[in-house]
Image: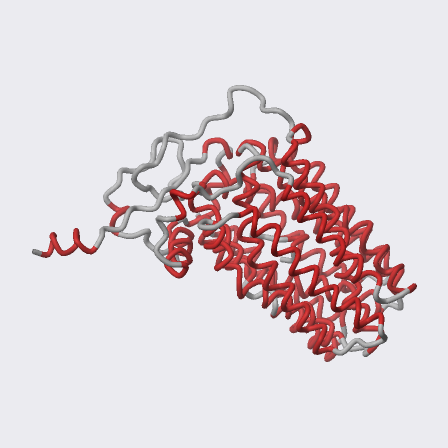
Amino acid sequence: MSERARVPPTGPAAPGPAAAAVPDPPAGQSSDIPPGPGRPPAVLAPRGKPPGLWSNRDYLGLWTGDAVSSLGTSMSAISYPLLILFVTGSVARAGLITAASLVGSVATMLWGGALADRVSRRAILVVCPLVQAAAVGVVAVWVARGHSPIGLLVAAALVGGLAAGIRSGARVPALRRIVPKEQMAAASSQIQGRDMAAEFFGNPLGALLFTTARWVPFGADAASFLFSCCGVALIRRPLGPEAARAVEHQSMLADVLEGLRYVRAVPFLRFIATWAPIVNMIATGYFLLFIAVLKYRGAGPMTIGLTDSIALVGGITGAVLGPALLKRVRAKLVFLSGGWAFVVGCVLTAILPVPWEIGCSVFLVMLVLVPLNAALDSYEVRLVPDQYSGRVSAAVFFGAQCLQWVGPLLAGVLADEIGPPDAALVFAAALVPLALMAHRTSALNILDLPVDQVQEYRLPERPCRAEVAGRVG
């Protein structure tokens, strides 16, 4: 899905002959986590309660810098489709802008993950926002001059997406260096809640600024990226990777393939990386349709911004309630409920006539999806060792987001041909078999386990060529 509603955000494949000779996992451990040599004992619950996240200075700095950046991005994110819709009236062209950004992100995501496991993650998280600031700053200048050529907007979105893809590979590995594993679900909920709150305030503010001067939301976004850079630069802890690990890598391509091999070996990650692409494709198209349906119902820019904020309250509520919910409800039930909530939300968006009612339909979707994403993040962190973190998180995100760029294009074409409400119903129908699929797979059985019982999985070592030659001789 989009970053505000990501499901990361993965015929079973055998883990390989090396894993087949390893004994079964210990009693109480899910068989859906493939066995591998060198696995440590089960991770136990922490003995003492760690300090709160708000007492963690590094986390607070990272969270605050990204909060300002998210506020700016939310202002430009709603201004892009408004600019196209109110200048040309074409939903398809508005979808093209979103698609360009997503294509750029997908194109560099895997390489960004490999890069994050071999070079300074701090440098990646500082340089990439500067590139994004330059891209959206160019848009602000051109719009201020009274120009809005579609080619320039697409190019700027593409460049920003390329930088975002590289940046995404370093975000999870850096976060896990400053947040204890047992607090990852809470951190994920807080980060999602922060982004929802940024959109809650940023969308109507962006729409208001757009009606005042169309270039201002883009200029504000360019400036906001500088806060993200500062937040990362002030982190005191090393973000990795260690130099000793960096020299072990043979090539970028080998690192990318290693991340993909890891995801393929773990049924849970493999399912997320292969099931989520279609869900996220539909989600990105759905949020464009959400704006298009509101305009179809007669809403203006300010009403659209306010209605979107109603929907975002659901995400903020989900972020606040998420950690407590995940302590009382199985993560698998949260996952399954999220799929059906999305179906219902699409249907209600299509049939409800009043903007605030449409906002409430998305409220329902966001209320469930935020805890869902927090659960998936916490289970992934428990499974993946730090030295694989960049590559594996990038591989999972790549699988989950590789088709996102299709969603806005498909939504735009359908909306122009059959109307936004009917297009939303088509998307709802496409979600039904995906929701049913989640009920039938065994790959999600790991979500029945408490997260603190999940063990790290280490890939079986591949024999070197000399060993293979010796066996043959």
Whether 354 is drawn above or below 24: the answer is below
Residue drawn at (56%, 66%) of the image: 403
102 in relation to 265, above or below: below
Residue 193 locus on image (x, y percent): 71, 43
In depth, the one of 384 and 15 nearer the eye is 384
Which residue shows up at 67% across the image and 28% down it?
55
Residue 240 visible in this rendered orientation of the protein: yes
Q: Nearer the viewer, residue 56 or 100?
A: 56
Expressed as whole percent of the image width and height from the top left, the position of residue 214 reads: 86, 67
Residue for point 61% across, 70% down: 406
Q: Position of residue 47 (x, y in %)?
A: 51, 20
In this orientation, does residue 10 appear?
no
Establish if 107 lies above or below 64: below
Q: Residue at x 77, y 51 (%)?
A: 71
| View extreme (top): residue | 48
Rendered location of residue 142, percent (x, y): 79, 72
